[in-house]
Amino acid sequence: MQTLIDAAQPYISAIVLAIVGLLAAVILRTVALLQAKGEAWLDGKLGVQQRDLLHKVAGEAYAYAETVYKSKESQVKLAQALEYATQQLGRRGIMVTPDEIRAAIEAAYLKAQILVRKM
């Protein structure tokens, strides 16, 4: 009987090691998937907050350019609003493209025009 156990010992060890390795691989894969989902959720959450801040800063930039540069033409006002928004977002560590900033400022302009027409 002892010789049978001694003969089977290398096979049993190999099977146990394979099962442990398989369990470790499954656990590591599960952790990686959970990490990816967590990062995606966090990026989405931060993305919404950053978008909200982008639109708030764009509204400020539009108001700033309209009040400080009243007598200037619209392209000068837009350039100043872009500069203001870029500086404010940069200070807050929010990285967005100039096109996104311009779109947000244009949206703030359109909202202001709608409000003016309603009055």
Image: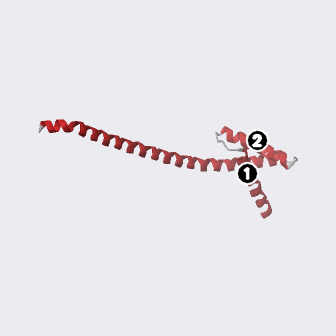
- Tell me the residue at 60%/48% (across/down): 47
The residue nearer to you, when weighing 28 against 48, is: 28
Which residue is tagged 2? 83
Q: Tell me which amino acid carries mark 1.
A: Ala
- Residue at the farthest left position: 1
Q: Position of residue 110 (x, y in %)?
A: 76, 57
How packed mark 1 is, by other alpha carbons closer than 10 Å (few <14, some 14-19, many 20 or more), is some
Q: CA distance from mark 1 to mark 2?
A: 14 Å
The answer to whether 88 appears left or right of 76 in the picture is left
Label 2 element class: helix
**With respect to residue 66, does 2 lie above or below?**
above
Q: Identify the residue position indicated by label 1 in the image.
A: 103
Q: Which residue shows up at 76% across the image and 41% down it? A: 83
Residue located 65% across and 47% down the image: 53
Q: Is residue 88 visible?
A: yes
Q: Looking at the picture, which amino acid does disc 2 mark?
A: Glu
Packing grade of label 2 (10 A; few <14, some 14-19, many >=20) is some
Q: Secondary structure at mark 1?
A: helix
Image quadrant where one finds the C terminus: bottom right
Q: Nearer the viewer, residue 13 or 92?
A: 13
